Structures are given as C-alpha cells and as structure tokens.
Amino acid sequence: MSPWWQDGVIYQIYPRSFADSNDDGVGDLAGILDRLDYLEWLGVDGLWLNPINPSPNKDWGYDVSDYCDVHPELGDMATLERLVTEAARRGIRILLDIVPNHSSDQHPWFQDSRSSRSAAHRDWYVWADGKDGGPPNNWQSVFGGPTWTLDETTGQWYLHNFLPEQSDLNWWTQDVWEAFDDILRFWFDRGIAGFRIDVAHGIVNDRELRDDPPDPDAAGRLKPVYSMNRPETHEIFRRWRKICEQYDPARLLVGETHVLDPVVMASYYGDGDELQLAFNFACVYAPFEAERLRRVIEQTEAAIPAGGWPVWTLSNHDVVRFPTRWCQGDEAKIRCALLVVLLLRGTPVLYYGDEIGLEQQAVPEEAVLDFAGNRDGARTPMRWSDEPGVGFTSEGVEPWLPFGSGPDVASQRDDPGSILTLCRDLLAVRRERDDLRAGAYASLPSPEGIWAWSRGAGHAIAVNLGESEATVDLTGTILVGTDRDRDGERVESGLRLGPAEGALLQT
C-alpha cells in the first residue's frame, strides 16, 4: 500500500493570508479550521502550513524565536490541536514548516550565545574571528550583501546566510542535533504528519569556513560550495528519517532543496533513508515551453533513485505565482499548467489560490512589508468572494496585505467550466485511477510545441504549448480536457489540440 503522500495532493497555506477568523486583518489557524469543508470538497490530502511559530517577523515567520509554540497572532496550541483533529476527520493531514538553518536573533538560544564567549549556547551558533580586518570569509548572503555581522560585545562575527536577524545554527555542535530531535518529537506527539524543511540544502556550513569560489555562470556571484550543500547535511536527514519511522513510516519529510541540478536535488533522497520528497526548482524556474519542461522532467526521472518519488509545484510564497510567471494571465495556459502538475508522476503541491488561477498581485509601495520587496504579491489574502472583505475578513477590516483583484472561489465553485472545477475534477480522476497516482511516466513522440506522456499502461496526457494547432498520435477517450466541451470525446485518428489546450485520455 502506498503512503498517503504518494497517492495524495498537498495544499500549501500561507496562514496569515488564508482566512481571518477574528477580524484583525490577519489570517489565523481558526480561519483554516473554518475552511476545512472547502478543502475536503476540493479533494486535498495534506495541508502544509507556512511558519506558525512565534517570530519577530523580520522574515515573516522564518526567523523563529520559539520552535515549540504558536505565534499569538495566528492562534494557540489548543487551536492547532483542534485543527489537526478536525482535519483528520476529513482525511487531511497537517504538515508544518521547520527552520533548522537559522533561528531569530531574538531566540533565547542566540540571546545567551551572544552574551559572552563562554556562554552555554555559544557553540550553538557559528562564531568566528575576522580576517584582515574584515569578516571571516567571502560568503554572500542569499538576500544580498555579506553573510557575517560583527558583534561588539564579544568581538567576534556571527554567520547569517540570510538576514542579520537570522543567525545560523552550528550543526557541528551535538546539542543542536539533540534540540531538533526534541522539536520533531514535540510536534509528532501532537499529531503533526511531517515537515517541510526550510533551506534543506543549506543546514550545515563548512567547518573550516573556506571561501566560496566564483560562480562561472553568474558574474559577481559566488558558488555556494562551502556555505551550503555540504555532504554532512545528509546525516541529519538520515537521523530525522529514523525519528519519523519510530512514530509512523508515513510521517513525511519534504525538503526545500533549492538547487537547479536534478542530480544534486535527487541526492537528498539518499538510499530511501533521507527525504521522501525533494522540491524540484528546476521545474519551477523553467520556461513554460514543451521541450524545456519535457527535458526537466526526463532529467528528474533519470536522477531520482529507485523507489524515490518526485514532488511538483508551480507556485509558492517565494516566487511569482504561476498564472503570471508562466501564463501571463492567459486562462487557457493556466488550465494547461494545472493539467501538467496534477498528472505527472509524483506528488502535486498546490499553493493557495492556484486552484482558481489567482495571479501575482500588485502591492503599492506604501503597503509593502517584505524586506526584499518582491514577494508580497504572492502572499496577498485568498479571494473567497467578490464581496467587501473578499470572504477573507469582515467588511471594513484592513487586511495585513492588500486584497488585490482577480478570480474568487464563490464565482467558480458551481461553474462547470471554471478553473476551480477543472482542478477539482483532475483531483477526483487522479484519486479514482491507479495509473494516475502510481503509473510510470514515459515521454511520447509528439510534434513541435506539444508535450505528451503516458501514465502507466492506460492513460496519456498531452498539452499544446505552441502557437498553432497540432496533432499528436494518440487515440482513446478524453477523460478531462482543458476545453471541458471535449470531455468524453472519442479520439480515433490522432488528438488535435489548439494552442494552449491539453487533455487527459484513457487509451
């Protein structure tokens, strides 16, 4: 029997933006509880919640000040436990974000660590003496600028691969390993089904703090050979996998493996003893073109070890939403993209709003909250209706980010031709047919502009991402087409597809 996450579909929720239950303009756990019936109706099997931990919100939860509690703006532990229970009644599991690369500089561990060189938690973080009047090495922050800050109190520099307020933990210290063992167990004991691991490829830094070499593919940048992607990271995942299996082999570890080489990404599966799922960013950043996408999927299929399982996503809280990035708002292309992500071999992850074709939103300069300035547009409130408050909050309440504009759930839910109905129907047909959950992927011959593949022995999928009508050599019955008027059509002498059209066939 396959584990739930292999058969199922995961839905990513940015809690602050999903549903506001108490009219403070901020989405919360109780709001997610209120929308569980919708998520059950949609047909998802797991919810991945972006960080819910207490945080000063310099990076909106990814600077954690307490790994074993809930941010009071989002709710409390009792509400989370009720969410776990009520979701389980609907066959839905809850995944949390875990942030092991760094903590907030307000975490008690770091506050103690910086108090003196002999502090109990000094070695829990990466401290080093400077070199030639500057920082210890040449590493560059992911967010730009140096990755070291001089602490005047102790006269040493501390490492932060992200913001200065996100101090890197020192995974060469055994106490850090044991602390995170306890964090995993704390949440597993409360019914959490698994974790999405933030910066999964960057947890461990080079012990000798060697300089990163220049990146030959990016002028002025360094290749993170020593600051990230260290081999010792694999030992952490093997240890965490054992903890998972002590509870239940179905407990899940999903990695934010932000690397573009499918071979490096696939290494985080180990020999079936590390991550069960590793996000594929080569697909996220590929252009929405038939040949380029086919190549990424084929390379991924070749790289993942036997028994490994792909995971696919089109949008998330850090990148421009796919209806804008891939589809430029073209509804026909949005339909094709959903057909692709839901019918590849692997676990699909939908980002809230994907199912209605929600685009990236324009956020006025005066309303921008993200320090990087370019991610808020993917994090605006979910559009449940076209009423004041968009169903996210009550009329007259100012949301934490602007509502934006675009489609909503209410206008699409009962429309048989809507994007939402297409998404729900694809989830349903996937759930009903073994081939579409477990069947092998194989590329099929197809003309320029069309990408076609089979799933198992009885199903084929084709999308036309070109500029003109074309025909692919397939026969069978269309189960679901992006043009819903073609559902049930018998294809006898090749599948004809117009531009930005796709179909699932039973062959």
Image (tube, rainbow, N blue to C red):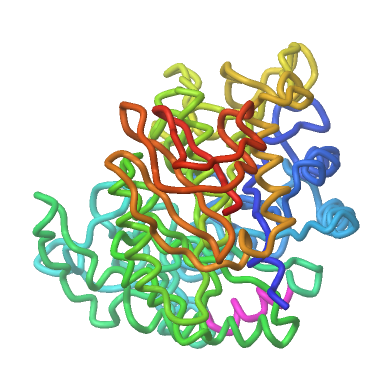
Residue closest to the eye, 379 or 352: 352
**Outermost residue, front side:** 492
Which picture quadrant has residue 484? top right
In the image, is residue 398 above or below residue 138? Answer: above
Main secondary structure type of the part rendered in magenta: helix
Residue closest to the eye, 184 or 276: 276
In the image, is residue 394 above or below residue 212? Answer: above
Instruction: Give the side of residue 52 with respect to residue 206, left or right.
Output: right
Which picture quadrant has residue 300? bottom left
Residue 271 picture location, percent across and down: 46, 87
> Could you tell me which quadrant the N terminus lies in?
bottom right
Instruction: Tell me the magenta residue range.
Output: 176-186
Magenta segment includes 121: no
Residue 450 picture location, percent across and down: 35, 42
Instruction: Give the side of residue 495 with respect to residue 162, left or right.
Output: right
Residue at screen point 66% across, 23% down: 399
Residue closest to the eye, 234 or 45: 45
Q: How many marks?
A: 0
